[in-house]
Image (cartoon, rainbow, N blue to C red):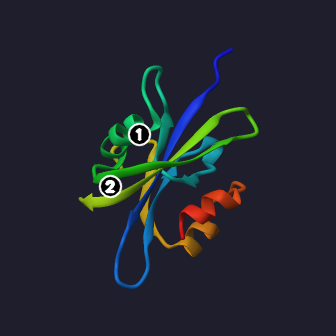
Amino acid sequence: MKKKLNAAVVIVRHNRITNKFLLLCFKGHAGHDFWCFPNDIILPGHTAQDTAFKLVPQQVDIRCRIKKEALTLTDEHGTELHFVLAEHVYGSPHPLHNVIREVRWCTKQEIKMLIDAEVPDEVWQLLE
């Protein structure tokens, strides 16, 4: 069985006071919505950075500069999660798919309140 690969894009918007990061709220099963970074599967023959470059405009209609693949983790289901760092260039995010309920720029503290899943320390370090 092939290993499942996903790319998650940590997009930072710099400002004078604090950095903010883009989160999406996806419609979940039985009304249980969940917040996460923009993400998608990595197709065969593509890299995490290729996926990040394509998925952000397709999901939220903004442009970002892909900086680097910063971290790879494996979740409890065996999926490799490739975290890609990116910097917001222009555009105001808005959902482009009916499965995305809301899009929001968040501080690190707000992310901690919104994300239900256990977030590894390495991911929090990316937000520094």
Indicate which label's residue lies in the foreground, 2 or 1: 1
Task: Tell me the CA gap for discs 2 and 1.
Answer: 22 Å
- Asked whether disc 2 touches disc 1, contact meaning CB atoms under 8 Å apart, the reply is no
Q: Which residue is mark 2?
A: 94
What mark, if any, has residue 118 been given in the picture?
none
Residue 79 x, y percent position in the rendering:
66, 33
Q: In which image quadrant can residue 54 be found? A: top left
Three-letter amino acid code of the residue under disc 2: His
Q: Most extreme residue toward the left, as rendered?
A: 90
Residue 67 x, y percent position in the rendering:
38, 52
Residue 44 x, y percent position in the rendering:
47, 20
The answer to whether residue 30 is above or below residue 89 is above
Residue drawn 37% across the image and 40% down it? 55
Residue drawn 43% across the image and 64% down it? 104
The answer to whether residue 103 is above or below residue 100 is below
Three-letter amino acid code of the residue under disc 1: Gln
Left of 41 or right of it: where is 105? Answer: left
Q: Which residue is mark 1?
A: 49
**Circle count:** 2
Residue drawn 32% across the image and 60% down it? 88
Q: Secondary structure at mark 1?
A: helix
> Which quarter of the image is occupied by the C terminus?
bottom right
Q: In which image quadrant can residue 49 be found? A: top left
Q: Earlier in the sequence, mark 2 or mark 1?
A: 1
Q: Secondary structure at mark 2?
A: loop
